[in-house]
Image: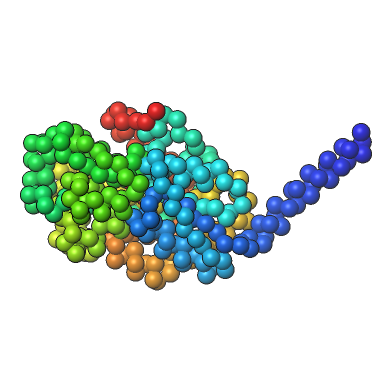
Amino acid sequence: MIRSLRAAACAAAVALLAVPVAAQQFPSRPLTIVVPFAAGGPTDTVARSVAAAMEKPLGQPVVVENKPGAGGTLGADNVAKAAPDGYRLLVWHIGMSTSPALYRRLPFDPMKDYAHIGLINDVPMTLLVRNTLAVKDLGELVAWARANAGKATLANAGLGAASHLCGLLFQQAIQTEMITVPYKGTAPAITDLIGGQVDVLCDQTTNTTQQIRAGKVRAVALTAPARLSTLPDIPTAAEGGLKGFELGIWHALYAPKATPKPVVDKLVSALQAALANPDVQKRFAELGSVIYPVEQQTPEGLRKHLQAEIDKWGPVIKKAGVYAD
Ligand code: ASP
């Protein structure tokens, strides 16, 4: 009996010791960042830039894996339940804070089921229409949407997506319902908008800047308080007559909860190095995106922001009465 107790105690001690050793050697193989939307969209763009710039500080390849579905919650859940060794990470956006109110049975807790690594960047959205729609500005879009209530189509990336939230706020602001068409990400959604299969899409400038400049879609409003130097001709929603229709989409990096502290620390440093990289800064600025200050590229910075955003969006979404069972 005593011998088996001693053996169990030894095994426990060995297991305890094993964590710091693995953590010390971290990373000794390639890492994966899960993007919970289709490739080629705005979350994917953010994650790929960060992943590439984290490779040097980590000394390992960082691969992006697209795992779309259920507005981003599928990929987020996948990472929440992954081994807490730092090798499987998640880049997600504001959806982390809106999904608790949107999903009655969310399979993870945004505050408790992750090791929060840090905030990345903030990106405004643009309200776009297909080129073949005879709408020149926000006022005309509102009039057209009202005249076509119940017929006008609005693309999004599912319940929990930024495009969903933006569409929700837009419909609330103009008190008109549109038919929502969900996609696996806004990359396929914008392809259909360009093709004329859907009428309207609200999406981050990280995905829309080039398409607007190329004249493939028409932007009628920006969800930021001031115009962007990268898209100077696009008026803000307030300029177009819609007050309070402002929305910044923030992105952040997560690991599964119980990831050892030394591993988290290495990921935080690698994230900070990536966001200090001049190429990343240039690319983000060109796409109308602002990088968070280094103090917020931290676990505490992210946790504080996430909790504030959960508190902010919960009541808005509950009031809208939108949810998935
Ligand atoms: N950012 C998009 C959204 O949430 C989805 C995507 O990245 O494809 O609407």
Taking depth in this image into account, of 72 and 137 the one nearest to the observer is 72
Q: Give the quarter of the image for residue 218.
A: bottom left
Which quadrant, please, contains the N terminus?
top right
Q: Residue at x 19, y 64 (%)?
A: 214
Q: Residue at x 81, y 45 (%)?
A: 11
Q: Identify the image's colour scheme: rainbow, by chain, secondary structure or one colour.
A: rainbow
Q: Is residue 66 above or below residue 161?
A: below
Q: Give the image location of residue 86, x and y in percent.
A: 58, 54
Which quadrant, please, contains the C terminus?
top left
Q: Give the image location of residue 74, x and y in percent.
A: 45, 42
Is residue 124 at all visible to an observer of this figure?
A: no
Is residue 20 at all visible to an observer of this figure?
A: yes
Q: Give the image location of residue 103, x and y in percent.
A: 40, 32
How many numbered discs sit on the rendered protein? 0
> As drawn, is 219 to the left or to the right of 63?
left
> As drawn, is 266 to the left or to the right of 246?
right
Taking depth in this image into account, of 272 and 321 the one nearest to the observer is 321
Q: Give the image location of residue 257, x and y in percent.
A: 57, 44
Q: Give the quarter of the image for residue 147.
A: top left
> As drawn, is 319 to the left or to the right of 145?
right
Q: Residue at x 33, y 41 (%)?
A: 158
Taking depth in this image into account, of 150 and 252 the one nearest to the observer is 150
